Amino acid sequence: MKKKIPIIILILIVIAIDIYCLTARGEEIKEGWIVCQPDSCVNIRSKPKKSSEAFGELELCDKIYTDGKVVNGYLHCVDLPAETTEGWVSKVYVVYDEPHKPKYQLRNIIVEQGKVAARRTIGGKVRRWLHSGDMIYVYAITKEWCVTSEGFVMTEFIDNGGCYDENFYDDSPAMTWEDD
C-alpha cells in the first residue's frame, strides 16, 4: 500500500504541472469547421507554408480543433482526423460557428440596390458580382458566410426562405470555377 501512494501522488503532480503549463501558455482549444467548395478539399500541411507536404485532406463542414496559433496565414490544428494528429490548414477555410447544410439548396440573391460580391474565399478576392434575383446553389451556411455555386457570399444577401426545385435537389451542379 505504501508503494501505491507515492505513484498516485506522482501522477497527480504530473497532471497538475501539465494543466498549469497549458494554462500559463494561454492555450485554449477551440472548435472550428472547414468551409470549402463541396467538390474540393482543404489540405492538412506538415508546416505552415503552401510548399510543405500535404498529408491529409478536410472536406466541407469537417470539424477541427485548434489552439489558435497562426503562422503565415496557416492555423495550427490538433487532434486531426488523420494519421498525424497535428498539422496546419489555411485559415481562410476555417469558421468558428458551425455551418449547416440547407435542406433547400437553390436560393435567391437579395440586395435592395447595387450588387453582391461572390468571393474566392471568406473575405477574399471578388470572383464575380451577383444581382438581386440571381439564383445560386447554397451548400453550407454559417452566421456570416455561405458556400455557394458562385463562391463565398455573405449570408445577409441570401434569401433564407429558399427556392426549392426538386429536379435539382440531389444533383445540383458542383462548383467548377478555378482560381485565375
Image: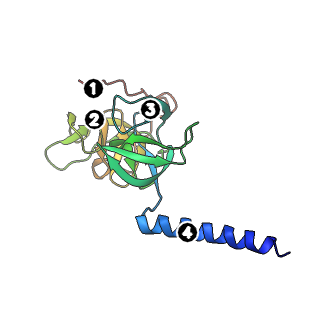
Give, as a three-letter code, the residue at label 3.
Answer: Cys
Q: How many marks?
A: 4
> Most extreme residue toward the right, as rendered?
1
Residue 120: which disc? Answer: 2
> Which residue is tagged 4?
17
Mark-to-mark CA distance, 3 and 4: 38 Å
Q: Position of residue 95 (x, y in %)?
A: 39, 50
| Mark 1: few/some/many CA within 10 Å (<14, 14-19, 20+) | few
Give, as a three-letter code, the residue at label 4.
Answer: Ile
Closest to the observer, 97 or 29: 29
Secondary structure type for disc 1: loop
Secondary structure type for disc 4: helix
For the point 33% across and 31% down, which residue is it? 50
Q: Position of residue 144 (x, y in %)?
A: 32, 53
Specify which label sits upstream in the sequence, 2 or 4.
4
Give, as a three-letter code, the residue at label 1.
Answer: Asp
> Which residue is tagged 1?
179
For the point 52% across and 31% down, which residue is it? 170
> Which residue is tagged 3?
41
Closest to the observer, 115 or 83: 83
